[in-house]
Amino acid sequence: MNPQPLQIRLSWEDPATGQRREPLLAVPIALGREFAQMPSELGGRRVSRIVFDNPEVSRYHVSIDEEQGSLVAIDRNSQNGTFVNGQRQTRTTLANGDILQIGPYQITISFVVSPSISTINFHPDTDLPDPRLNQPPVATPTGSTFPPPAFQQSQVSVQALHATGLPVEEIDYAAIGAGLGSFVWVDLLRISGVKIDRIAALGMEEKPYARYRRLCMNSQIPLHERLRSNSDSCPDNIWGWPSYALREVWHDLIKGKVGDALGYLWQVFTEPTFAQTYTPRSGNVFDAIDREAQRIGWEQIFRYGSVRAIRKTSDGRYAIAYSRRRSSSAAPDYRLLIAQYVQLATGYPAIQFLPDLKAYREKTGDFEAVVNAYEPHDRVYQHLEQYGGTVLIRGRGIVASRIVQRIYEARQKNKLISLLHLMRSPKPQGNKFGSAQRQVDNHYEFQPFNWPKACWGGELREMLAKANSQKRQELLAAWGGTTTADRRDWKRIVQQGLSEGWYQITFGEVEKVERDNSQNRTVTYIQEKGLKGQIRLEADFIIDATGLDAHVTASPLLADIVDRYNLPLHDNGRLVVADDFEIVDLRNQRGRIYAAGAMTLGGPYAAVDSFLGLQYAALCAVDSLAAIRAPGLHRLNALSSLWQWFKWATMRSP
């Protein structure tokens, strides 16, 4: 009997999405850019072949094999080299926890099989992150009377829906999610002539920015702090003028703050060469959206409810089943909506939560010392400001940077605060594309926005739009990655913390997290890079800043649609959409379903979850609807657009 092949886990972050990939593979393993160029067998054993779509990765870059009881990495004459723990190698023995780097991919080698990333789900009745909700509820629970039995079919009869006795509303346009993506689409429909009574936006919260604002506040971006966005990316204004910077200039001039006003103008006209990139204050963004929501009649368009399922109807439209439940003690109110044109913009379906921290919570029941950056956790900073203590941050990127700044602010009130930052591996160099390379400072990778600026409206956007599906994945991998906004204050804080000793960066793979009751502290056991032994990191609090989960299957609603209609997904777990953001496989005669936001990454646009990305998706979708002469919708031209801008400026209804 042949012995079972050795299995190891390779873990890395997708450069395009920042999400974790953690396949469990049998040795031998081949890593490269082209599947056909890697051997299918080595020494009579089947090879596990992993493809990395990135020009910095060679066609057959490196192999991992077992030799005399050891695991060995062999560079296969790659152009850019193979690095192990930051050192270039042609042939080297791998140890548990080593970091193998090819191109922009930093791959952790794990001999012990560890669980993949876990999540914190949003509660279906409150839309709040609920750490005690272990699994998202299914969209159509077995034995439930809602959605009605007709929804068990892929195509339902409108007559059957009316026969259920449930309230049925028929409308032309339906926006599913009622968040920022829905708001931008509805705003453009209204500007294009669609009447209020022909549009419905289904969601859990009346303010279209409610979830976004809550996640910002939880991750320590209060209303006076600045978002990672651009001056002219305005969800309340499709024209982008006047921009946020001009509005802030005018506001400060009125108050007599001439120096501040001139400073904003200097930023906009000289960024990023002579000044750091201008970004708007979150409170100003939300106030502007409130103004536009009032102008377009959002209050009449919004429908409170949690969407449970969507089905095609036999007459070329779509049936939407949703429930209304204002409190856990209230009886649910079930309703149906029928629409011909639908937009899906449900946002990120879950929050990523590291599995060892989830295991710690389940074992100890301690939800105070171990928190996620996107959960409410102001109590952590209040405790630190009063008593001092040590915080351990997990993950790096924009959210981790904001947490570091908040700890720095707490230290102004109590110097007895220290910060440990645990990263999986060093970051010796930034992502490269052509002759451009991102800056790295103290293992943070800096860039003004989460994608290069040319992805929004420059040559990179055009390059992606013209590429085929395979080339798009390659380009996204080359451009993407977890980055921190290029802000001087964050760089200064990190450098000051390192020099003063209250901030330390440690690299290693976590083995387990436990509670030391004698010290009333958490203990994180890691295998530190370059060392053979285990070390302990003690902290009063642990903050997980690993980000959000955008996999379509993490959403019960989207998972149900994907399963019911066998929708294709990209390798990154996102929906396949056309260049106008239509989900073509859901077309139903004249009926159309479009998508927007993070669920569409892999399509014609990179920055899909940005303000401008949501506007771009809406513009493409509405232009497509105008081309098929959707009811009540008129294509904008130069004169009509100028007239609509005048109405926007004077706060007149479209």
Image (spheres, grey):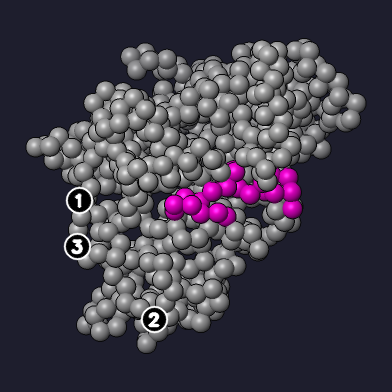
Element type at marker 2?
Answer: strand
Q: Quadrant of the C terminus?
A: top right
In the foreground, 31 or 163: 31
For residue 536, the mark is 1
Magenta stretch: includes residue 441: yes
- Compute the Cα span from label 3 to label 2: 24 Å
- Could you classify mark 1 by the number of other residues whose Cα lies within 10 Å: few (under 14), some (14-19), or many (20 or more)? some
What residue is disc 2 on?
Answer: 91
Residue 565: x and y in percent read: 55, 46
In the foreground, 410 or 654: 410
The amino acid at mark 3 is Gly
Q: What residue sits 32% from the left and 44% below the top?
A: 501
Relative horizontal placement of residue 470, taking residue 308 as reference (left or right): right
- Position of residue 167 relative to residue 593, above or below, is above
Magenta range is 438-459
Q: Is residue 257 visible?
A: yes
Q: Upstream in the sequence, badge 3 or badge 2?
A: 2
The amino acid at mark 2 is Arg
Residue 314: x and y in percent read: 63, 35
In the foreground, 199 or 148: 199
Q: Upstream in the sequence, badge 1 or badge 2?
A: 2
Q: What residue sits 37% from the left and 46% below the top?
A: 498
In the foreground, 193 or 308: 193
For residue 533, the mark is 3
